[in-house]
Image (cartoon, rainbow, N blue to C red):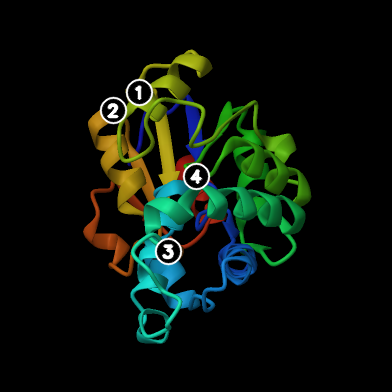
Amino acid sequence: MLVGIKAVIVDLDGTMVDTLGDFEEALNRTLADLDLPPVTRALIERTVGKGSEHLIRSVLAHQLALPEVTGLSNVCQARSVDTLYEPAWQRYQHHYLRINGEFSAVYPGVVEGLARLKAMQLPMACLTNKPLAFAQGLLKAKFLDGYFGWVFGGDSFERKKPDPMPILGTCAAMGVVPAQALMVGDSQNDALASRAAGCPVALVTYGYNHGQPVDQAPHDLLVDSLLELAERLTS
């Protein structure tokens, strides 16, 4: 039983919105611009969650190592992750901002859960490793922005989850100590950041956790939906 909760911090990708479709579309448009083969959704699911830089670098490394790429006569050492990252990041931003939310869907129970939490008069912040502009656009596109008094992205702080800095910064902005803020997420990034920051964490059983069972990550509560979370907090 969680007691003394005065604020709620909610992750975005994999927790509120299934965004794999957005990632897949933006990445594959980017890869096409770079004359690289498309990426599989399975790879995206294993890689997403640690910020756009990590995602792009991981995908580039994987695609450049494919036999159909290394076997091409025009491949040279200059065509590396480091040399391709900057153009890839520019093209990725261009494509993602154009399709943001178009190929994604809000998970069941999210709207109902957020409404219940808001009715409890709990201040809420969205904290994600997604770039802030992407996060704000997605929340607006999915009509979720009205539930949050604060929104912080992966570029809002010097470090990203699983570092505790973003959670500590969010708690400071909300005017609560970490022990009073419940972090709600879908992966070990959220779990480890919460533990290091000293705040309780609830994990959803769906979402993206780098291909690992989420129940193996540190947690205080495991729920199947945000609606269940709100019900557990009020019971």
Task: Please state the horizontal and vertical placement of residue 175, each as a whole percent of the image.
Answer: 48, 13
Q: Residues within 10 Å of mark 2 (few under 14, many from 20)?
A: many
Q: Which SS class for mark 1?
A: helix
Task: Please state the horizontal and vertical placement of residue 79, each as a whole percent of the image.
Answer: 41, 63
> Which comes sooner in the sequence, label 1 or label 3?
3
Residue 178 numbered tag: 1
Task: Please state the horizontal and vertical placement of residue 211, each as a whole percent of the image.
Answer: 32, 69
Q: Which residue is mark 4?
A: 11
Mark whose residue sits in front, 1 or 3: 3
Q: Split into 4 quadrants, where in the image is the N terminus?
A: top left
Q: Does the residue at mark 4 contact the one at mark 2 (Cβ under 8 Å)?
A: no
Residue 102: quarter of image: bottom right
> Which comes sooner in the sequence, label 3 or label 2?
3
Residue at mark 4 to residue at mark 3: CA–CA distance: 26 Å
Task: Please state the horizontal and vertical placement of residue 15, each as a whole percent of the image.
Answer: 51, 54
> Which comes sooner in the sequence, label 1 or label 4?
4
Q: Residues within 10 Å of mark 1 (few under 14, many from 20)?
A: many
Q: Which residue is mark 2?
A: 197
**139 sits left or right of 84 in the view:** right
